[in-house]
């Protein structure tokens, strides 16, 4: 009787140890898989960050939303790229959005591997527009009626031409 009781206790102890070892192994496997997903999402996000959209401020909310984990700097990026066209700007946005969207899909497909902030950022990226409908290009200051005044910068410039439309140093993206 004592030996069968001892065997039963030994069996229970071994089962408990085996269960703990199994749980630890399973947790290690899950963490290893999550680490792969985190690395993949951040690599895609870094590729998205590297895509410069010419003539658009890095801090433009339509652009800065397309980044997981880290925030954009306030620098002006490629604003001096005056040869860029509306098509160049739209194409760059689509490329950046596509890469950011891929990163967001990794996060959203493996929510358990990411914290709430990453999940929220991924949801915002997933809902961001995929295409630009219109690009308003940068412009020099001019009179609202189109008059090319040489007095811009001086008080009263364009006073007889509907007022002054200030210069825009960056492009503006519009979406449907």
Image (cartoon, helix red, strand yellow):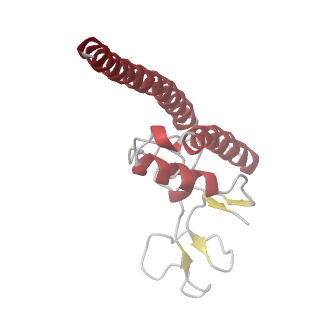
> Considering depth in this image, is 110 or 11 the residue closer to the camera?
11
Q: Is residue 57 visible?
A: no
> Where does residue 92 sit, x and y in percent of width and height?
67, 41
Screen quadrant of the N terminus:
top left
Furthest-front residue in this view: 1
Measuring 50% from the left and 25% from the top, which residue is drawn there? 33
Measuring 48% from the left and 54% from the top, which residue is drawn there? 120
> Where does residue 17 sit, x and y in percent of width and height?
32, 19
> Where does residue 132 sit, x and y in percent of width and height?
71, 56
> Considering depth in this image, is 103 or 145 the residue closer to the camera?
103
Screen quadrant of the C terminus:
bottom right
* Total residue callouts: 0
> Where does residue 96 sit, x and y in percent of width and height?
62, 41
Measuring 57% from the left and 51% from the top, which residue is drawn there? 125
Q: In this picture, is 7 found above or below 84? A: above
Q: Is residue 20 visible?
A: yes
> Considering depth in this image, is 42 or 60 the residue closer to the camera?
42
| Quarter assignment of residue 155 | bottom left
Q: In this picture, is 97 found above or below 48? A: below
């Amino acid at each position: 009787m004592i030996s069968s009781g001892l065997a039963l206790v030994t069996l229970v102890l071994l089962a408990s140890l085996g269960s703990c070892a199994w749980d630890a192994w399973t947790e290690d496997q899950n963490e290893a898989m999550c680490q792969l997903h985190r690395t993949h999402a951040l690599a895609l996000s870094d590729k998205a960050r590297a895509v410069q959209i010419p003539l658009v401020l890095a801090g433009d909310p339509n652009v800065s939303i397309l980044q997981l984990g880290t925030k954009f700097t306030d620098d002006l990026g490629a604003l001096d790229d005056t040869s860029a066209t509306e098509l160049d700007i739209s194409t760059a946005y689509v490329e950046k959005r596509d890469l950011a969207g891929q990163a967001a899909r990794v996060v959203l497909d493996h929510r358990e591997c990411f914290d709430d902030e990453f999940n929220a950022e991924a949801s915002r990226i997933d809902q961001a527009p995929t295409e630009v409908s219109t690009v308003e290009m940068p412009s020099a200051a001019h009179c609202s009626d189109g008059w090319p005044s040489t007095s811009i910068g001086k008080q009263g410039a364009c006073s007889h031409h509907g007022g002054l439309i200030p210069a825009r140093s960056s492009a503006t993206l519009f979406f449907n």
